[in-house]
Amino acid sequence: MSHPGQYANDRTYALPESWEPVEQETLQTALSQTLEALTGDDPLRRLGYFYDPLREYAGTSFLDAGHNSETSIEADDLYAVSRLSITVTNRQGRCLLAPGPTRNQATDLLAALPPSLAIAASLDASVLEQMWRLHDLFRTLLATDTKDSNHWVFAAKLCARKRPNLFPVRDSQVCGYLSGWKALGAGTGRLGRFSNDIQVFAYLMTHDLIEGKLAQLREAAAKARLRIDEEPLRLLDALLWTKATGTP
């Protein structure tokens, strides 16, 4: 039997048989990096840029665009993903929007992951396997000669659009930052792999220091009359990305 995954509040959750738990050092590095991204006056300033509707950052458009159906992939989802500097290819669009096996499979996989599921409370081996299947379906829609990182980044962002409380918006910048700028991929302490990344975000989203700082920033944003995403995981995504990329 696989060792369990670790939440930060002394709870654990079952991992799929093929998964390995993330090392404690990796979790602590990610926690340290996240606390740095959420401390001081700079986080609110970064949120002000990212969520300013007069600037060119995605802000709330990633989740607000269109209807965002809970049960299927639609054109507004592909538009929303493109707001995060992702090019949606013609093949991806046809596979996901046209009636056929890929669209049907995406609908079935979404049905297996109710919108009520949250990374901070709902993980177990079955949920993680369904999450991987959805991510893997989206990951395989690019041509095989396309740069490999583009496959998983597109998949990560489309998953986060459809289930924003369950999937983080992962990209190479955020994963690099959380790992202390180690190389991405397989290896001790590295991120950029689905199984490791999900465990790291589950740990972060249940840590009392992170929860407290997100609540403080939400309160500060409200006082500043700044409209931000309601989902805590999406807010953390924005704070990590702006820190990792030096935005603004």
Image: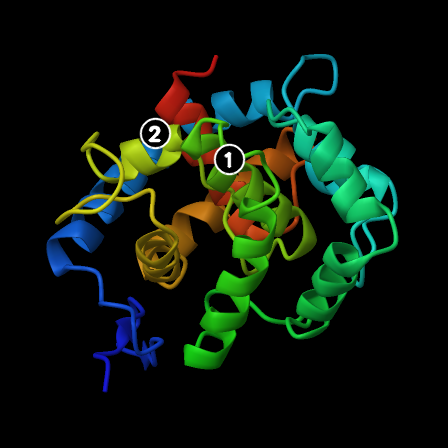
Near-viewer residue (17 or 223): 17
Quarter of the image for residue 72 reads bottom right
| Residue 191 position in % (x across, y down) | 28, 44
| Residue 217 position in % (x across, y down) | 50, 40
Give the residue at x 34% y 81%.
14
Residue tagged 2: 40
In the displayed structure, would residue 115 be above or below residue 53?
below
43 left or right of 63? left
Are discs 2 and 1 less than 8 Å apart at CB? Answer: no
The colour mode here is rainbow
Residue tagged 1: 144
Give the residue at x 40% y 46%.
213
136 left or right of 93? left
Crowd band around label 1 with a 10 angstrom C-alpha radius: few (<14), some (14–19), many (20+): few
Q: Quadrant of the N terminus?
A: bottom left
Viewer-side label of 2, 1 = 1
Q: Amino acid at mark 2?
A: Gly
The number of discs equals: 2
Mark 2 and mark 1: Cα distance apart in space: 44 Å
154 left or right of 42? right
Crowd band around label 2 with a 10 angstrom C-alpha radius: few (<14), some (14–19), many (20+): few
Q: Secondary structure at mark 2?
A: loop
Give the residue at x 31% y 41%.
34
Q: Amino acid at mark 1?
A: Thr
The numbered mark, 2 or 1, whose residue comes first in the sequence reads 2
